[in-house]
Image (tube, helix red, strand yellow):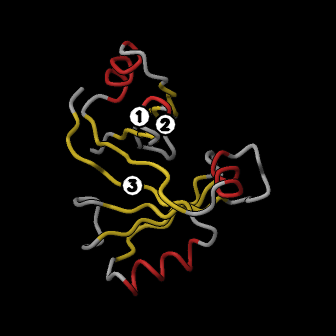
Amino acid sequence: MITKKISHFGVLVHDADAATKLWTESFGLTKFDDRRIEVEGIRSVFVSVGGTWDEMVIEIMEPLDKANMDNALSKRLASVGEGFYHVCLEVDDVEGSGKELEAAGMTVLMRDPTEPGASARWLVHPKDANGVMVESVKRS
């Protein structure tokens, strides 16, 4: 598998607006994207030093319905609270790298794109990656 770079890491929060204010005002990062990802049931706000995808990014993640315990993020927020959620690797071949990881015995969940024009992606279960959920993405 060829990893091009670490794309971003996700931070799960109760209030994306308050968290965005913290990361921008306290740490000097720049907000550059704010999305409602209905298929995942989350709102994601993206911040980085220069406000672009060309650098390390933080994804601030808030469940749209915190009472929905069928949503993995709501469930995690209720049981564990706020904090680190995942790391996302940028790869050249999402499907091929996912198959390689499966062949190596990892639990890989293939996911559809979150928006038109985006690539499919995979998630590796935390039990197979030192307790960390790993996501993939392919950027154009």
Q: Mark 1 highlights which residue? A: 129
70 or 112: nearer the viewer: 70
Residue at the extreme bottom: 25
Q: Position of residue 9 (x, y in %)?
A: 39, 55
The residue lying at 27 percent from left, 36 percent from top is: 91
Foreground mark, 2 or 3, reads 2
Q: Which of disc 3 and disc 2 is earlier in sequence?
A: 3
Alpha-carbon distance for marks 1 and 2? 5 Å
Q: Tag 2: residue type?
A: Pro
The residue lying at 71 percent from left, 57 percent from top is: 78
Foreground mark, 1 or 3, reads 1
Q: Which of disc 3 and disc 1 is earlier in sequence?
A: 3
Q: Mark 2 highlights which residue? A: 126
Alpha-carbon distance for marks 1 and 3? 15 Å
Q: Residues within 10 Å of mark 2 (few under 14, many from 20)?
A: some
Secondary structure found at label 3: strand
Q: Mark 3 highlights which residue? A: 9
Q: Residues within 10 Å of mark 1 (few under 14, many from 20)?
A: few
Secondary structure found at label 2: helix
119 or 7: nearer the viewer: 7
Kindly check if marks 1 and 2 are in contact, taking CB atoms under 8 A apart as contact.
yes
Q: Tag 3: residue type?
A: Phe
* Quadrant in which the N terminus appears: top left
Q: Position of residue 82 (x, y in %)?
A: 58, 63
